[in-house]
Amino acid sequence: MVTSFNVPRLVIAAPSSGSGKTTVATGLMAAFSERGLAVSPHKAGPDYIDPGYHALATGRPGRNLDAFMCGPELVAPLFAHGAAGCDLAVVEGVMGLYDGAAGRGELASTAQVAKVLRAPVVLVVDASSQSRSVAALVHGFASFDPQVRLGGVILNKVGSDRHEVMLREALEEAGMPVLGVLRRAPQVATPSRHLGLVPVAERHTDALASVSALAAQVRAGCDLDALMALARTAPPLDCEAWSPAAALTHSSGRTSASPASEAQGSGGDAPGNGAVPADLGGAPGGRPVIAVAGGAAFTFSYAEHTELLTAAGAEVVTFDPLRDEALPPGTAGLVIGGGFPEMYAPELSANEPLRAAVAAFAAAGGPVAAECAGLLYLGRSLDGKPMCGVLDADARMSERLTLGYREAVALSDSALARAGTRLRGHEFHRTVIEPGAGAAPAWGFTHPERRVEGFVQQGVHASYLHTHWAAEPSVARRFTEAAAARR
């Protein structure tokens, strides 16, 4: 049912990466939350790390809006799902305002998300090396696409009072409101490393202090009342809010025209379609326990994955491979997502009891879904440190960054997907694993390059590819069915 959904909202964008989007977006979220508002945090694109800071600032799950992985048609429903009952929604953009999936026009750009959400855009401009030229820059961004409504500018890294005056005069001449001015403030910078900011889970106390400092900086430098007034100009959205239960009901698993021609092997004990009732909550023995890796080494996850697993009938329990020496009691399925195991290889290796438990679970045919960091953890070794040994593969850090969207087709039946299922995802890592694929590969990439990748063996599906299950909820249902079948 299509309904009219209205929540004040802003999209925080920039001319390019490094302009200060995360600083401003997180600071705004925290500052408005401190006013007692329920703020819904969102991130355009696939980034896992920024939403962790957003969640810290608002007390609500940070949610991604990715038009490539989920499709433009799901952007508004997923937004409405996350923002329901909130007083304000803030969406942090990705890269530059008009940057998106390579060679795909506006697809997955911040501009596309802003247009789908009918939301005003606030442009964060790094003004550190310009004065009057800022007007020409902003004019270009405001006029490039008339359907993108640029509502104002926040100037970042302003050097002095005189510098601010020159910038304001130039933008006044261009007719563009200045909604905030932030001075250079290295004391509130958040640390980064090879894949971006250090996740919240690795520096929780320091991250709290950083978010508090960002809120203070934004309060002092931005016109919060004017920003809220701009957010209220967003018109109602005519859409039905996404629901995990409804998504599972309507999902079917998109397959290629001829999956048999693509298949490279069998996943062995993968369940057949419809083998287990979808209403697993009422099944004898209760809900199957699906253990999800967390803690500092495994911080990458989308909130919708847990919601889908729960709606499919699972009891989701989090465990920390750095600390816990056993899987949660009754574990029937295991999800090990992304993160930074390379930063914790010695500690992960030292937890021999858990490594043995994971290996035994996989050897017994238990369903395991592993993405990126999970793939590394399941291998024989990571940078020479013994891991779980589920896969006959060794991983190591590399100088090369592998980054980008991928179009993929499942090549082997598994607990996660039927052969032929098509999904879009992304890769984001500085590690390599050798070999890169097993006898039964997980995925065949069809764009932007053709190659096979990942491992399917018994109940294990392990790959570098990050996916968003809201795009194909049958993945969560199939995995929960596989877990239920093992009780």
Image: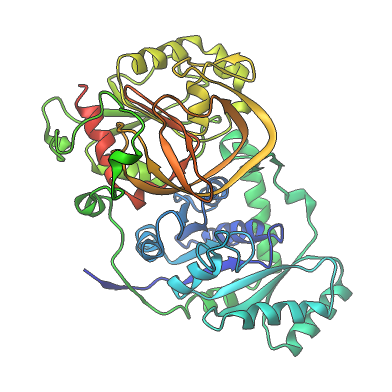
Quadrant location of the N terminus in the rendered image = bottom left
Percent from the top left, x then y, of residue 329?
Answer: 31, 19
Percent from the top left, x then y, of residue 344?
Answer: 61, 24
Frontmost residue, 227 versus 346: 346
Is residue 269 depicted above or below 274 in this figure?
above
Marks counted in the figure total 0
Q: Residue at x 31, y 29 (%)?
A: 290
Q: Is residue 420 left or right of residue 138?
A: left
Quick check: can you spot residue 70?
A: yes
Frontmost residue, 9 versus 48: 48
Is residue 135 depicted above or below 383 in this figure?
below
Is residue 273 depicted above or below 161 in this figure?
above
Is residue 339 depicted above or below 91 in this figure?
above
Q: Is residue 246 left or right of residue 426?
A: left
State the image quarter where residue 85 is shown. Answer: bottom left
Q: Residue at x 12, y 31 (%)?
A: 283
Quick check: can you spot residue 292?
A: no
Q: Is residue 216 left or right of residue 324?
A: right
Q: Residue at x 18, y 38 (%)?
A: 273
Q: Residue at x 34, y 33 (%)?
A: 412
Q: Is residue 271 left or right of residue 18?
A: left
State the image quarter where residue 140 is shown. Answer: bottom right
State the image quarter where residue 432 is shown. Answer: top right
Percent from the top left, x then y, of residue 245?
Answer: 23, 50
Percent from the top left, x then y, of residue 163?
Answer: 86, 73
Quadrant location of the C terminus in the rendered image = top left
Colour scheme of the picture = rainbow
